[in-house]
Image (cartoon, helix red, strand yellow):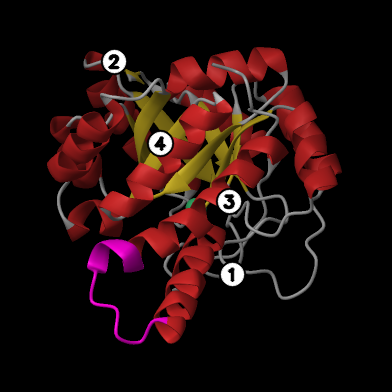
């Protein structure tokens, strides 16, 4: 496995008009499934853990599993902290061996978001770790379903200021995307995206990849989106197939077989996401 920074992956994607999919993980089978599908598709991938997922075990555990599982595979991957809530989270993950961190200060006033991101960038830069920032609210709810206090779309001028005044490597924006499942078909605000990419010359990140129609996703990628996050769609496939397997095999006590049934369904989705991001055969 070639473990690299997210910046390296995104720079290639940004230059060549595709996106690198980022998949959320919390256990061994998630990591195995993503690495297996990535190897099959010859696609670079980002393995990411929300701060809650990182602490479900520990940042060190996540990194150890990725390294051990990746060792025997031909894959290129970065390990990224998704929605770090505090400076301390980013430090813990950098110490644990993550090659990239996100600090999410999008609920704070702009000045505070910038000040905190500068601190994260200073720490991460010193050890060659990538930093993702966020401005704008990605839907009405946070990644974990909490209702957000402050809901706003990304303002292109504010995005420029944030990118200019920090050393972030990529920027997550709110252009009509949302976490979780969409209740009606999303319509990305391409006018806003275009105004952002006119001013911000670093890779753009789209959270809430689950449920964005392929044509919209690929149009956004063509405009400078270089990372797309997928989480809910993977978990749903994993859990749904595991339930169905247990329903058909009520006496099954092989935990390996039960978990594998979830993993195989998740892998199908990972392959689809890789194709939607036009990331197949990029490694
Ligand atoms: Zn997110």
Mark 3, residue position? 268
Find out whether residue 245 is within the magenta segment: no
Q: What is the CA distance from the residue labelled 3 to the residue labelled 2?
A: 33 Å
Mark 1, residue position? 140
Percent across and percent down for residue 68 are 20, 32
Q: Quarter of the image for the N terminus: give it.
A: top left
Which mark is drawn over residue 35? Answer: 4
Along the polypeptide, which appears first: circle 4 or circle 3? Answer: 4
Q: Nearer the viewer, mark 2 or mark 1?
A: 2
Along the polypeptide, which appears first: circle 2 or circle 4? Answer: 4
Mark 2, residue position? 128
Q: What is the CA distance from the residue labelled 4 to the residue labelled 3?
A: 12 Å
Say left or right for 66 vs 154: left
* Rendered image quadrant of residue 271: top right
Residue 183 appearing in the image: yes
Q: Look at the numbered discs 3 and 2 and tell me whether their residues touch, using CB distance below 8 Å.
A: no
Q: Residues within 10 Å of mark 3 (few under 14, many from 20)?
A: some
Percent across and percent down for residue 245 are 44, 75
Q: Secondary structure at mark 3?
A: helix
Q: Secondary structure at mark 4?
A: helix
Residue 116 lies, with reference to residue 241, above or below; the image says above
Q: Quarter of the image for the C terminus: give it.
A: top right
């Amino acid at each position: 496995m070639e473990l690299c920074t997210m910046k390296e992956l995104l720079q290639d994607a940004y230059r060549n008009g595709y996106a690198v999919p980022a998949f959320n993980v919390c256990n061994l089978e998630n990591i195995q499934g993503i690495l297996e599908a990535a190897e099959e598709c010859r696609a670079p991938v980002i393995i990411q853990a929300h701060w809650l997922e990182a602490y479900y075990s520990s940042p060190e555990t996540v990194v150890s599993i990725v390294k051990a599982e990746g060792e025997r595979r031909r894959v290129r991957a970065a390990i990224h902290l998704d929605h770090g809530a505090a400076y301390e989270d980013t430090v813990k993950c950098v110490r644990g061996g993550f090659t990239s961190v996100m600090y999410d200060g999008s609920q704070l006033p702009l000045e505070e978001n910038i000040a905190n991101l500068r601190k994260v960038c200073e720490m991460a830069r010193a050890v060659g770790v990538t930093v993702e920032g966020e401005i704008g609210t990605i839907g009405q709810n946070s990644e974990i379903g909490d209702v957000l206090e402050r809901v706003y779309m990304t303002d292109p001028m504010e995005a420029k200021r944030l990118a200019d005044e920090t050393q972030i490597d990529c920027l997550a924006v709110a252009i009509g995307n949302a976490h979780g499942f969409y209740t009606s078909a999303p319509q990305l605000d391409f006018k806003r995206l275009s105004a952002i990419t006119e001013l911000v010359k670093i890779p753009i990140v789209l959270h809430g990849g689950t449920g964005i129609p392929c044509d919209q996703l690929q149009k956004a990628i063509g405009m400078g989106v270089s990372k797309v996050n997928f989480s809910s769609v993977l978990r749903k496939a994993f859990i749904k197939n595991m339930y169905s397997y247990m329903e058909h095999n009520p006496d099954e006590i092989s935990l390996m077989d039960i978990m594998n049934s979830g993993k195989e369904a998740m892998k199908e989705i990972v392959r689809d996401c890789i194709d939607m991001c036009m990331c197949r055969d990029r490694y």
